[in-house]
Structures are given as structure tokens and as C-alpha cells.
Image (cartoon, helix red, strand yellow):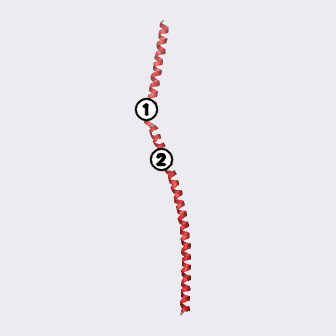
Amino acid sequence: MNDDLAAAVADLRLVVVQGLTEIRGDLALIRQHTTQSERRVDDLAGELGETKGLLGKTRDELGELRQNAVTKDEATERSRRQLTVSGLMLTAATVVVALISLFAKGG
């Protein structure tokens, strides 16, 4: 009976050792996976920070563009004013030339 008990304890010990060995292997894999996951999270956090920085810069640039942008109506009105001023200047020059010609003939 002692031999049977000793054999059963030896079998149990073998099963426990094998189970612990498997658990150690599984824990090693879990540690490795966790380490890789932490590295990936750190990498993604860095990329996210860079992306947020670029997004902020792009928003600032867009805001500046909006402040400096001219609408189509504003551009049309500006062109209209420039043509009006140019026309008035041409008319004034024509009147001056006509007056000079008139005084030159009369004098």
C-alpha cells in the first residue's frame, strides 16, 4: 500500500510539475504579448501626438486663410471699383487734353 501511495504521489507530483511548466510558459507568452502591446501603445500615442500637432497647425493655417480670403462678390466689387476709378481718370485726362487743345488754338 505504501508503494501504491508513493506511486500515486509521484504521479501527482509529475502532473503538478507539468502543469506548472505549462503555466510558466503561458505566463512568459503573456508577458511577451503585454510588452509588445505596451510598445505598440507607446508608438501609437507618439503618432497620435504628432497627428494632433499637425491638425492644430492645419487648423491655424485654415483660420488664417479664412481671414485673408476674398469672396467672389468682394472680388467682383473690387474690380468694379477699379474700373470706375480708371474710367474717371481717363475721362479727366481727356478733359484736360481737350482744354489744353482748346486754349492752344485760342491763344
Which numbered dot is residue 27?
A: none
Q: Residue at x 47, y 40 (%)?
A: 64
Nearer to us in this view, 62 or 97: 62
Q: Give the amino acid at mark 2.
A: Gly
Nearer to us in this view, 30 or 94: 30
Q: Going by the picture, which residue comes out furthest to the front? A: 2
Label 2 to label 1, Cα distance in Å?
Answer: 34 Å
Residue 92, located in which quarter of the rendered image? top left
For label 1, the residue is 77
Query: Going by the image, does 63 lie left or right of 18?
Result: left
Q: Going by the picture, which residue comes out furthest to the bottom? A: 1
Q: Crowding at label 1, few (<14), some or many (≥20) Cα neighbours within 10 Å? A: few
Sequence order check, earlier mark of 2 and 1: 2
Question: x, y (%) of residue 81?
Answer: 44, 28
Nearer to us in this view, 84 or 26: 26
Query: Going by the image, does 80 lie left or right of 47?
Result: left
Q: Give the amino acid at mark 1.
A: Glu
Which mark is in front, 2 or 1?
2
Q: Residue at x 54, y 80 (%)?
A: 16
For label 2, the residue is 56
